[in-house]
Image (cartoon, grey):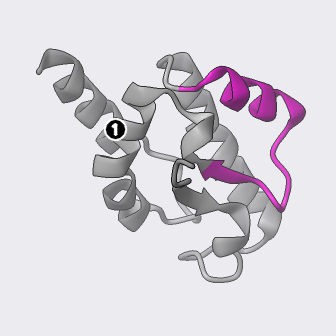
């Protein structure tokens, strides 16, 4: 049986997230990340289906939700992006964009 990696959970961000004022604020960030993953074709069919159901307080991003490229990108770069998240500021996915661009060019 393959090991499942849990990259992130909404519940990990409130109240622990930097300036995260509510679970709703945390969910907005997850929607942004999931949209980014979808737009960049990094989700598996299961990931697309799960995202289609919606992001709630129990939502998590796990390895089965991603395709091979998605897992590779998140394994290497998601934790670095997380360190930059400040919920009082606009969502910035530049780190993930830059790393994905490097991945595509390698």
- Residue 80 occupies which quadrant of the picture? bottom left
Q: Residue furthest bottom?
A: 16
Which residue is pictured at 53% across the width and 29% down the height?
A: 36
Q: Residue furthest left?
A: 106
Residue 69 appears at what percent x and percent y? Answer: 38, 27
Which residue is pictured at 46% across the width and 62% down the height?
A: 85
Residue 21 appears at what percent x and percent y? Answer: 73, 74
Label 1 belongs to which residue? 73
Which residue is pictured at 21% across the width and 27% down the height?
A: 103
- Residue 71 occupies which quadrant of the picture? top left
Q: Is residue 93 left or right of residue 77?
A: right
Comparing 19 with 39, the one in front is 39
Q: Is residue 29 left or right of residue 103?
A: right
Quarter of the image for the C terminus: give it.
top left
Asked if the magenta segment contains residue 53, the reply would be: yes
Q: Looking at the picture, does residue 53 appear above or below residue 23? A: above
- Numbered circles on residues, count: 1
Q: What is the magenta range?
A: 43-61
Q: Is residue 70 left or right of residue 39?
A: left
Residue 100 appears at what percent x and percent y? Answer: 29, 29
Q: Is residue 94 left or right of residue 90?
A: left
Asked if the magenta segment contains residue 28, the reply would be: no
For label 1, the SS is: helix
Residue 56 appears at what percent x and percent y? Answer: 85, 53
């Amino acid at each position: 049986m393959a090991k499942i990696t849990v990259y992130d959970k909404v519940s990990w961000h409130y109240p622990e997230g930097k300036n995260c004022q509510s679970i709703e604020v945390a969910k907005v960030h997850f929607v942004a990340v999931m949209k980014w993953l979808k737009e960049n074709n990094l989700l598996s069919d299961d990931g697309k289906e799960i995202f289609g159901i919606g992001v709630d307080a129990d939502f998590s991003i796990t390895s089965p939700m991603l395709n091979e490229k998605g897992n590779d990108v998140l394994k290497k770069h998601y934790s670095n992006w997380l360190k930059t998240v400040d919920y009082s500021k606009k969502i910035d996915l530049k780190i993930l964009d830059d790393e994905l661009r490097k991945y595509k060019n390698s």
